[in-house]
Amino acid sequence: MKFGKEELLKLYTNLVRTRAFDKAAVKWLAIGKLLSFYHPAEGGEAPGVGGTTFLRPDDVISPHLRGHGLPHLIGKGVDPKYYLAEHCGRSTGAGNGLGGIHAVFEEFGLYGGAGTIGSCFPLSAGWGVAAKKNGREQVVVCFFGDGTSNRGTWHEAANMAANWKLPIVWVCENNGVAQYMPIKDAYPLNDLANLASAYGMPSAVVDGQDVLAVAEAVMSAVELARKGEGPSFIECKTSRFSAHGIGNPDKTHGIERTQEEIDELRKRDPVVLFRNSLLENGTLTPEDVQRIDQAAVDEVAAAEAFIDESPFPDDPSILDKALYAE
Amino acid sequence: MRQLMYLQAINEAFAEELERDEKVFLIGEGIQTGTFGTTTGLVDRFGPERIMDSPLAETAIAGVAVGASLMGYRPIADLMFSDFMYVCADEVLLKAAQWRLMQGGTQKLPCVFVANMGGYRKLGNEHSQCPYSMMLHSPGLKVVIPSNPYDAKGLLKTAIRDDNPVAFLYHKGLLPMMGDVPEDDYTIPFGVADVKREGTDVTVIATSFQLFWAMAAAEQLESKISVEVIDPRTLEPLDMDTIMTSVAKTGRVVIVDEDTERCGFAGELATQIMEQGFYELDAPIKRVCAKNYPIPGGIMEKFVLPQPEWVLQAIEDVMVD
């Protein structure tokens, strides 16, 4: 799939916006504005942004936990302020202040978020069954981490998807470490894309720091699924610049990651890589860069003002209305 | 009136709802064949796209029910044995039950989880559970446990039409039970208990298969104790009004429930009765439940699962207290 200038700019803009909102979320957690916990996306934004920016509005996504789905939501076209308002516990949030980290945007193909890692697989199988039945050529794109791929739910859903040729693209965001567990010690082969071969599913391994490579690979798989040719698996070799969650130690097997290791990872920053490439081929000008950066800063500021003005929910009767549909 | 077996009543409810609404479909292991006859023959009428034989994969089956319900379908996940719901507890208890509230309370999840439950077949602990206490402990899931063919058809049709997730647990011991089942399209609302027998001395609340023991005991004791027997039919929602009206009349309560006694439905119900009607009670509430052991295989299950004489004894004891 080839992308035109406008599409490349959109992709870059979404990447920059994701970086800005992710940094804001980290800051807001520190000052107590963002509630609960936060698992930053920094360094691993490209799979989510690249895998969603060119989907149809009604394509279904299941976001990964990195950045609590901000890369995926932003790529899909969701206004992140409604998600972050929810995460800040406000009644203007996408879950009416009931969801916290969970959020639903049905008009953007996001039917909600899950807390148990690996439950994305059976749910995606369900969305895939519905998408196949309804004949609207919707595709489901399920994003998950290397750690998630260790769950047994993967087998049940992958087998069902391949067996029934469900329109699903599995996008593995392999950043090399699941919380504190290196994937090299949790899976015996080098590429998680091997997980596809047992089901006869096509797979590809892409540079997950190259947002354009991700977009091309995912959209090729999406077109296959849309044509009724069944599921595919895209492994994105990506990165994680900081610890698993804010406040967590940055360790694997109990041993601190060294500054040298982190510096090495930061050399392949997906935002910088894509910016340089677009500047080099003339798609972006330095003025564009400045304008897009400024727009992201302004958008974050506007979102923060919206959140600050939003009340906290205080009516317990909301719980009764939310428990059951009438 | 026409008589049907319990399993046929379930089958007929499926067929009528599949006919009525094209969004309804079934998914499960071997359902085109039908392990217990409840789904047998449906594939001939509705085709394999709507009667979906799935791989052996409970989490995926239950996940399909949740996911497809969110996208406008009315899936029925047949999980065969309700014990297998432990395998897909995440999908049933955290996803189906709690999804709507957790995503802000705007969505509908019209899915039904169907499975048999109960013991007395010497099948051991992983094919004999009545696992509804864990379901009741996960708010957002309706729980239906029909005790006869008429209720099975009417309640299943209500379950399929409900816009919320429902666990429909039929008792394997009731499968061949015959009973009156109208041919017409009727439904039974949730949260309406059925007074199976009127009495004035003691209220016996018995669930599903346990109704048999309760009714037999009531009959046997007829000459000396007047027993009122109530079938709650649905555990969530639970018809406490009917139960409390009866308790106000009798002042004595025996709860007969096949689930394990500790932290089971009977304990919950006893607490609610005490909270709502402590001063109506003339004696401590008695429970007849499965004892606090795993349900053994073979004949040893008779020492764990409720037995008819335990029910008789409990009713006589509660009259003495």
Image (tube, rainbow, N blue to C red):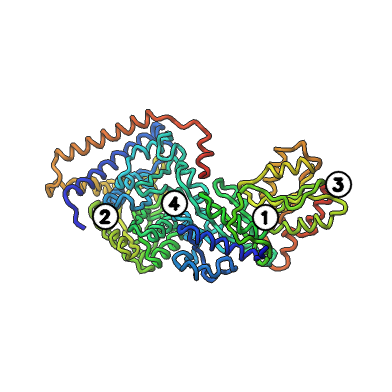
Circles 1 and 3 on the same chain: yes
Mark closest to the chain's N terminus, 4 or 3? 4
How many numbered marks appear? 4
Which residue matches tag 1? B259
Residue, far right: B224
Amino acid type, callout 3:
Val
Q: In which quarter of the image is the N terminus of chain B?
A: bottom right
The chain ID associated with circle 2 is A
Which residue matches tag 2? A214
Q: Residue at x 80, y 52 (%)?
A: B314
Query: Mark 2, residues whose alpha carbon is within 10 Å: few (<14), some, or many (≥20)?
Result: many
Amino acid type, callout 4:
Leu
Marks 4 and 1 sit apart, C-alpha to C-alpha, by 31 Å
Amino acid type, callout 2:
Val
Which residue matches tag 3? B320
- The mark lying in front, picked from 2 and 1, is 1
Looking at the image, do the residues carrying marks 1 and 3 touch, with CB atoms under 8 Å apart? no
Judge left or right: residue A203 versus residue B196: left
